[in-house]
Amino acid sequence: MCLAIPGKIVELLPEDWNMAVVEVSGVRRKIDLGLLDDDPAKAGDWVLIHVGFAMSKISEADALEQMRVLALLGEDEAARQEIEGYGPPPANDNALRR
Amino acid sequence: MRFVDEFREPELITKAAHEIRRLADPRRHYRLMEICGGHTHAIYRFGLNDLLPPNIELIHGPGCPVCVLPMGRIDDGLSMTQDPNVIFTAFGDMMRVPGTQGSPLEYKARGADVRIVYSPADALKLAQSNPDRHVMFFAIGFETTAPSTALTLMRARAQGVRNFYVFCNHVTIIPAIRAILESPEMRLDAFIGPGHVSTVIGCRPYEWIARQAGKPIVVSGFEPLDLLESIMMVLRQLNDGRAQVENQYKRAVLGEGNRAALKAMADVFEPRPFFEWRGMGFIAQSALRLRECFAEFDAELRFRIPGIRVTDPKAAQCGEVLTGALKPNQCRLFGKECTPEQPVGALMVSAEGSCAAYYSYEHRKAALTVLAPAL
């Protein structure tokens, strides 16, 4: 909750509020970019995520470093669970509906 | 020094540790408080205390939102589950936190509809897919999570959702630091400032700590090297007789913070006149509640909340540990009645609580030494 999880934005979903598909360690989930309105993010950007919301943009190097810190702290499993807990990306949404 | 092996740059760590020893004046005793629970966890996990000279003491601050929440608020939140139509949602961190009648997980085992969410937005979605139920989100956290709750409430209003409620326990870090500095038994020399909270609030809210209270504060990252570098920066300030706000975590923290997040918070929340902090008592303007324009989503207005106040178990000394007067292992219950498996106090529940961190690393290390002195 207090340690941010780094993720890479792979797709913006502008028709769905300010949502975006983000990838964290190979897992794709939907997160909210609404708190980055002052400095909008685009596909390819790296962000720090708290409870499903991107809170700041960071460099790729710093994102990888933050991933490593989570692993060192033994928090990587909790972070993975949190990410998996976020909503699935649209394609999976459809798959679930079918 | 066990954990040092895992570091990517052990030679830099050794260099930083040497530099800290050089900077630490042997005639002085340095008491530095790391405010953030994430830093507390990192300090124990990386065994950083082992790298510091004995005259540098790290005091663990109040920056673990689960730990500072009074038990009465948990009871109050769980009281809503008496209505079978209520779905109680909270982050996973909350699920094992004991109330007087058990934790949210224990309520669930007894039949209450208690669900883990990973984002306040998930709680809102749950409300939309269960229009005939009341979905209550137990909101908790400092400025890292409060903006997300705020934005979720704005979305709930824009979408006309009528069955979503927030039980707001968001707290703010600055009034807590003020309370610590004003407490008569406090003897702190400087602060290590929180990293991720500062991505939201920026560095300016700390200016008074340097200017008025005369204490250095360095906003820090979470890597072992970040923390050691921040300690160096603090020592340099103290040795020069300076008191400034410095930012060691420039790669994530901008001076002015995240304006969109601050605006969302200001639009949705207002400060409560007072809020109780576990172990620290009532602190003025230290927590947030929903503004009147969001009253329809305010669980405290829509449900009958008993307003329970629970004094901590007498034997537990959470308050003294929380304010740095006692080390975790100096509490009467530490490692006996109170363990991470069977927590009595909240400091033992969260990995960011100083007792759980101390227990997991220091206590285990000591036990290993006793059991296997030959190793």
Image (cartoon, coloured by chain):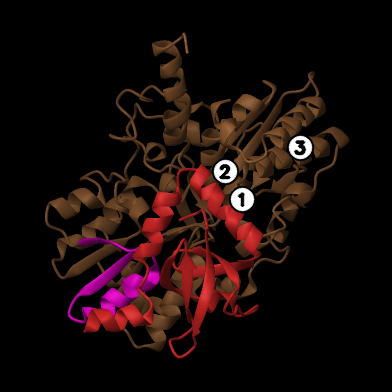
Looking at the picture, does residue A90 appear above or below residue B271? below
| Residue identified by numbered label 1 | B194
Task: Tell me which amino acid carries mark 1.
Answer: Pro
Residue A4 within the segment the image draws in magenta:
no
Q: Point out residue B349 in the picture as x, y percentages from the top left corner.
A: 36, 41
Q: Amino acid at mark 2?
A: His
Output the chain of dot 2. B
Chain under callout 1: B
Q: Which residue is mark 3?
A: B232
Q: Judge whether B26 appears above or below B58 on screen.
A: above
The quadrant in which the N terminus of chain B is found is: top right
Residue in front for this viewpoint, A71 or A19: A71
Q: Amino acid at mark 3?
A: Met
Label 2: state its secondary structure: helix
Residue lying at 51% horizontally and 40% vertically, measured from the top left: B41
Q: CA distance from mark 3 to mark 2?
A: 16 Å
Q: Which chain is brown?
A: B
Residue shown at 68%/44% (left/top)?
Answer: B226
- Residue at which label 2 appears: B39
Which residues, given as a range, are shown in magenta? Answer: B114-138
Query: Are the residues flagged by discs 1 and 2 in contact, CB closer than 8 Å?
Result: yes
Q: Are marks 1 and 3 on the same chain?
A: yes
Query: Which quadrant would residue B312 be assigned to in this image?
Result: top left
Report the mark closest to the observer, 1 or 2.
2
Frontmost residue, B50 versus B159 = B50
Give whichever of discs 3 and 2 has the lower sequence position: 2
**Image depth: mark 1 or mark 3 in front:** 3
Q: CA distance from mark 1 to mark 2?
A: 8 Å
